[in-house]
Image (cartoon, rainbow, N blue to C red):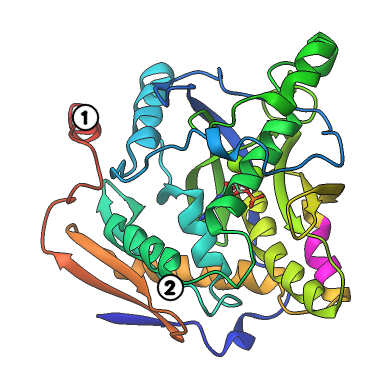
């Protein structure tokens, strides 16, 4: 077992390590039935929602995806196979994972309460990292077991508000090709979280070159003609209206995850829908992702973006030096722990992290 110390975080302070601007190299969609497709059919566009809407409306007909099955890295690996078949070149990232895993790592210096468990394996010079599914289900169960404050909305309802806000803010095509009728019927649409558009980007933090996949909510306008230009993605978020100092602190804590999530995929803009305690959409604010660390620094100053980047660069260096042989490794941070632990769980193979299809494709080349 080896440990990577998170604390003291001050040793990661200072100007930020090198970063590569994320560049989309591939994408995939899950359709309205959550069927996988190697295309952009679930891409959506942003169009501002009406204010004053009750975000709870339609909770009773919410179609929520059952994600109790473990999908490992399947969608990402299918996309890599397709990309390699189309281009004839191998993706040579040192780290391959979902955006959610990188978010947990990058937030670790300032998020003491969230533990995590991941599985990792080295295969052909890349380290593949997935979430440990049992741990995910277990923490979800524990979260649900916690009673809500008296009179407070349930966690399920609050989670619905997020999806409802997305439904209220998205249109299927660019606004000038979308009819008034489609825009106005958004408020009565059944909310469904089956469909997703996922962007797969090449990026880098410090010395590590990475391939990351993650969901993006919407486009601001359209994708640029030049594939090297940045894409005007929009991330949608909801947050409780801020009434006092304590709320500001809570909000700035949330901004850490908002910022990291969008930073990792190169999403330049976040639309935050502010809602009342009982879920009425009151106003929204447009945040530029790159300005968020500065906003927090001038605010309560409870986290430091450069420090997160430096921490991640150092962690990835250490990961590359630690996971040097095959087998299945566990990356774990227990709640409140000052360290991230790594140990080898299985002496050989790749466990279920890599699909047979992916291994076969790579071995056949
Ligand atoms: P909010 O972030 O506005 O609460 P994302 O913002 O990542 O695109 O996710 C969309 C919505 O899914 C979230 O909206 C939230 O409602 C729900 N959601 C995402 N992750 C969740 C989690 N771990 N637990 C509960 N709900 C979650
Ligand atoms: Mg989303
Ligand atoms: Mg969102």
Where residue 200 appears, x then y in whole percent?
52, 36
Q: How far apart are the two marked residues, 1 and 2, measured between alpha carbons? A: 31 Å
- Which residue does the numbered mark 2 point to in the structure image? 115
Q: Which mark is residue 263?
A: none
Q: Which mark is residue 357?
A: 1
Please tell me which residue is depicted at 58% across the width and 51% down the height of the picture. Answer: 157
Q: Inspect this view and state whether residue 90 appears.
A: no
Where residue 103 appears, x then y in whole percent?
54, 59
First reached walking from the N terminus: tag 1 or tag 2: 2
Please tell me which residue is depicted at 40% across the width and 41% down the height of the picture. Answer: 92
State the residue in front, 261 or 323: 261
* Main SS class of the magenta portion in the image: helix
- Secondary structure, mark 2, is loop
Using the image, determine if residue 199 lies above or below residue 114. Answer: above
The C terminus is located in which quarter? top left
- The quadrant holding residue 115 is bottom left
Q: Quadrant of ligand 2?
A: top right
> Which segment did they paint magenta?
291-296
- Secondary structure, mark 1, is helix
State the residue in front, 25 or 29: 29
Using the image, determine if residue 253 lies above or below residue 136. Answer: below
Where residue 272 appears, x then y in whole percent?
78, 50
State the residue in front, 269 or 227: 269
Q: How many marks?
A: 2
Please tell me which residue is depicted at 49% across the width and 72% down the height of the picture. Answer: 114
Q: Is residue 45 magenta?
A: no
């Amino acid at each position: 077992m080896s440990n990577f110390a998170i604390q003291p975080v001050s040793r990661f302070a200072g100007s930020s390590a090198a970063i590569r601007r994320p560049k989309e190299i591939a994408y995939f969609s899950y359709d309205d039935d959550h069927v996988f497709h190697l295309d952009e059919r679930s891409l959506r566009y942003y169009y501002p929602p009406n204010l004053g809407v009750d975000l709870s409306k339609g909770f009773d007909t919410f179609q929520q995806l059952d994600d109790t099955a473990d999908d490992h890295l399947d969608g990402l690996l299918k996309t890599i196979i397709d990309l390699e078949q189309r281009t004839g070149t191998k993706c040579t990232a040192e780290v391959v994972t979902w955006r959610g895993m990188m978010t947990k790592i990058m937030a670790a210096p300032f998020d003491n309460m969230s533990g995590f468990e991941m599985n990792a394996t080295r295969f052909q010079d890349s380290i593949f990292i997935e979430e440990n599914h049992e741990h995910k289900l277990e923490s979800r169960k524990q979260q649900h077991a916690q009673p809500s404050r008296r009179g407070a909305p349930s966690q399920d309802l609050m989670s619905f508000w997020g999806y409802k806000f997305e439904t209220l803010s998205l249109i299927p095509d660019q606004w000038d090709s979308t009819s008034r009728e489609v825009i106005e019927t958004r408020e009565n649409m059944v909310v469904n979280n089956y469909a997703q558009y996922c962007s797969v980007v090449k990026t880098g933090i410090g010395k590590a070159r990475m391939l990351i996949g993650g969901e993006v909510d919407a486009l601001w306008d359209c994708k640029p003609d030049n594939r090297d230009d940045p894409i005007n993605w929009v991330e949608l978020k909801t947050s409780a209206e801020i009434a006092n100092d304590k709320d500001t602190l809570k909000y700035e804590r949330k901004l850490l995850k908002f910022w990291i999530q969008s930073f990792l995929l190169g999403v330049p803009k976040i639309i935050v829908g502010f809602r009342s305690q009982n879920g009425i959409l009151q106003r929204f604010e447009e945040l530029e992702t790159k300005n968020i660390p500065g906003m927090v620094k001038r605010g309560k100053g409870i986290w430091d973006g450069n420090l997160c980047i430096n921490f991640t660069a150092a962690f990835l260096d250490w990961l590359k030096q630690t996971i040097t042989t095959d087998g299945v490794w566990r990356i774990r941070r227990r709640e409140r722990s000052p360290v991230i632990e790594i140990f080898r769980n299985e002496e050989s193979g790749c466990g279920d992290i890599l699909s047979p299809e992916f291994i076969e494709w790579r071995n056949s080349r």
